[in-house]
Image (cartoon, rainbow, N blue to C red):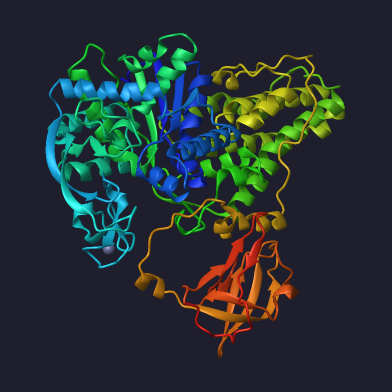
Amino acid sequence: MKKQYKRILITAALPYANGKIHLGHLAGAYLPADIYARYQRAKKKEVVFICGSDEHGVPITITAENEKTTPQKIVDRYHELNKQTFEKFGMSFDNYSRTSIPLHHQTAQEFFLKMYNAGILIEKKEKQLYDEKVKMFLPDRYVEGTCPKCGAEDARGDQCEKCGTFLSPNEIINPRSKITGETPVLKETSHWYFPLGKYQKRLQDYIKEKNEEDGWRENVLKYCQTWFNEGLQDRAVTRDLQWGVPVPIAGYENKVLYVWFEAVLGYISSTKEWSYKQNHQKWREFWLSEDTKYVAFIGKDNVVFHCIVFPAMLMAWNDNSEDKYVLPTNVPANEFLNLEGQKFSKSRGWGLYVDEFLEKYPADSLRYALTINLPEMRDSDFYWSDFQARHNNELANTLGNFVNRTLTFVHKNYNGKVPAIGKISELDENFINEMRKAPEIIGNLIEKYRFRDATLEMMNLARLANKYFNDAEPWKTLKQAPDRCSTTIYLCLNAVKALSILFEPVLPFTSKKIRKMLNLKDNYYWDDASELSMKSGEQIGEIEILFNKIENEFISESSQLMSEGPVMTQEVMQKQTVTIEEFKKLDLRVAKVIECEKVQKSNKLLKLQVKIGNEIKQLVAGIAQHYQPEELVGKNIIVVKNLQKTSIMGIDSEGMMLAASDQNGKLVYITTSTDIEDGSIVK
Ligand SMILES: [Zn+2]
């Protein structure tokens, strides 16, 4: 017997305020969470849907230093930007908070003190790398040096990008401080640790129980099992850093709480913020009650924090307090979405940012294409061709077409009024049955977090509706059997209404438009989709086209959003200090442009043939908006000759041309002050 809950608490992973939201993020946590929240609201459940920016941690302080600004400026920028992007995408958060606000700091400190005072935390003394010049301990990413595994010279204190090994700063060979480039010394420091291992047995029981109750995903259970097999270890709760939640005890003035510890508590502080804004204490009902079903939506990289670390922290609190927090009932983590067969990568410039995408295409089309491709069981891919096909064939030709032909018929033949229902034929009966079943079938799939399958069922109903319209042939029965015709159209109007309800979790903007066309209010109940509740004689609204077809030309233009990622993103790249040896690895040369032409279907790219001594190389450069091809022919430019060959829009590029942005954003090519022979080495 399934437990009946009074209310549902839904959280979506807090995005890190150090970059923009891309399509992979949406497919991981946000879109599934939003579909679930919208459905539960339509079921008239008491729901709160919580999110916010995760604003602490070392990557943010590093970005701030690179841009010569403050961490606060960085998080202000991305918090605002991502918040707006989520709104445009139709995310229906009840609250979108941020972890740099005092309310969050208080909440996190309260948790720390509860554990500290209960004697749960363990203090350990350890040696940590220290930069004597700036007098500070170096957090992992502030240390660079040689990887002990593969010998790469640019390994970071937390990980070697070359071989992927996770590292700790003390393992790095020949460590350097990222701030000064100096060799750091080992100095003693102390930190508080959370004894995660002590909770292992209880965590295993907890996951087993919730899995039996609510059916956890196989992949999530597998990740957890891997952690359990390795045995859970103590985790440091504090670290030496200035930016973050201060550790509220004496002797720890220069330290903050580790992000893993405080970020998950952002769900609680965000719910509090929502509550306080409305002068109520409802956050307590949601968080401190056994009657709450808590569903935490995340991407697979967050499984350990939400299935193991966060529940253990809540257990530690609950053991020592009258107030008992609810633990996640389920953590439906998705795998990763890839882009045209390759992983999203900020450093490689391979990405598709949501704000840029939404400047060209409607949010609902993206929501639909992503939902039908959600990486629920395994990694999946976003392909432009698939996006176009889904939009054109399913949204425009199936859903849009059915709504349009039905409403057009009503305006043309019934003066825009809902016709009367007459005698029901077998054909009608079958169609009514399909409509009756749909809300439950789709609802059950959503309850089981199977959003892809739910969406297939939604579109299936639109397909059946089109088939019913075709089979019933109202354009023939209009004259021959008016009673049949009005019955057909009456049922079709009810199907349009049903589609507006059932598609709402995936297509909220479209649903709103359909309801406006039907002259219906937005406040409805999910199960009303199975009722023949349209009232005969009532006037419907004006018709609006739901989806315009997307043409091939437009798609190939748009695909540049991604293939020219580094040009499109105005973000300052994170630059690390390099040694002279590292610099010498670059083969910079003077090259002469001998041919130059535009790349077809691109308004950003030029294709160049350049002569470097006795070699000819082909380059693709994103400068077509700044130069006409003929302006470059005969000119000396500087190129990176030994850059790994790549393909841009299907054209090989065998090096890179250097250019600089002027104050107006115009890209200016770099040249030599005298006409030096091509092939000359730049050093
Ligand atoms: Zn390595």
Rendered-image quadrant of the N terminus: top left
Residue at the spot x=44%, y=54% of the render? 574
Q: Nearer the viewer, residue 196 or 78?
A: 78
Using the rendered view, name the quadrant where residue 674 is placed: bottom right
Residue 381 position within the rendered picture, expressed as x and y whole percent measured from the top left: 49, 52
From the viewer's perspective, is 13 left or right of 235? right
From the viewer's perspective, is 676 left or right of 270? right
> Vertically, is 63 above or below 678?
above
- Give the residue furthest to the bottom: 614
Q: Nearer the viewer, residue 1 or 325?
A: 325
Residue at the spot x=84%, y=28% of the render? 478
Using the rendered view, name the quadrant where residue 58 is placed: top left
- Give the residue furthest to the front: 133
Residue 451 position within the rendered picture, expressed as x and y whole percent measured from the top left: 47, 36
Q: Is residue 471 visible?
A: no
- Give the residue furthest to the top: 280
Q: Is residue 21 visible?
A: yes
Residue at the spot x=21%, y=25% of the render? 249
Q: Nearer the viewer, residue 578 or 108?
A: 578
> Vertically, is 354 above or below 340?
above
Using the rendered view, name the quadrant where residue 596 is placed: bottom right
- Number of numbered discs on residues: 0
Residue 145 position within the rendered picture, expressed as x and y whole percent measured from the top left: 27, 61
> Vertically, is 377 above or below 623?
above
Please tell me in which quarter of the rendered image ligand 1 is found.
bottom left
Residue 205 position within the rendered picture, expressed as x and y whole percent measured from the top left: 18, 29
Q: Nearer the viewer, residue 207 or 426?
A: 207
